[in-house]
Image: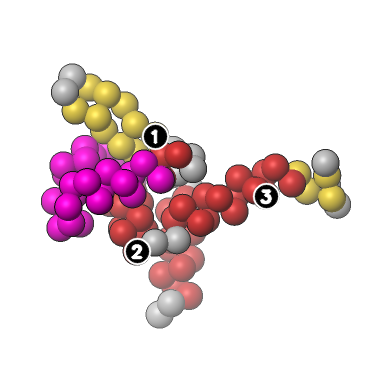
Amino acid sequence: MKINEVDIEQLDRAANMLKAIAHPMRIAIISFLEGGKKLTVTQIHELLEIEQSTTSHHLGILKDKGVLSSKREGKNTFYFLRHQNLTQILDCLNHCCK
């Protein structure tokens, strides 16, 4: 279904991505992955200084909503931004919150 040439499913996906991002720890995770960086759960949890299980929970939400992707390399799973331009949303928010 289209309303004024806008795809309702696309709007739903966009809203779900924004909901997934809307948490301080998840915003921090996205900022750590800017510039094409790939980090493991352990690296991210050390940067956040929170429990590894909590980090895994946040990563799972971001991955489920299409914000992050992951790639297994040996014993490690690396997380990275699925769409690098998501950092523009963070830049906009940082500018607006000053």
* Disc 3 target residue: 11
User: Distance of mark 3 from mark 2, alpha carbons?
Assistant: 23 Å
**Amino acid type of the residue that numbered disc 1 sits on in the rendered structure:** Ser
Q: How far across and down, in percent of the image, does residue 7 sit?
A: 75, 44
For marks 1 and 3 on the same chain, the one whose residue lies earlier in the sequence:
3
On screen, 31 above or below 7?
A: below
Q: Residues within 10 Å of mark 3 (few under 14, many from 20)?
A: few
* Disc 2 target residue: 24
Magenta span: chief secondary structure: helix
* Disc 1 target residue: 69
Residue 1 lies within the magenta run = no
Q: How far across and down, in percent of the image, does residue 50 sit?
A: 18, 56
Q: Which residues are magenta?
A: 35-61
Is disc 1 placed on a helix, strand or loop? Answer: strand
Q: Does the residue at mark 1 contact the one at mark 3 (Cβ under 8 Å)?
A: no
Q: Residue at x 41, y 70 (%)?
A: 94
On screen, 35 above or below 23?
A: above
Q: Which mark is residue 25?
A: none
Q: Residues within 10 Å of mark 2 (few under 14, many from 20)?
A: few
Q: Is residue 9 left or right of residue 68?
A: right
Is disc 3 placed on a helix, strand or loop? Answer: helix
User: Distance of mark 2 from mark 1, alpha carbons?
Assistant: 19 Å
Q: Residue at x 27, y 24 (%)?
A: 72
Q: How far across and down, in percent of the image, does residue 68 sit?
A: 40, 40
Q: Is residue 36 visible?
A: no
**Amino acid type of the residue that numbered disc 3 sits on in the rendered structure:** Leu
**Amino acid type of the residue that numbered disc 2 sits on in the rendered structure:** Pro
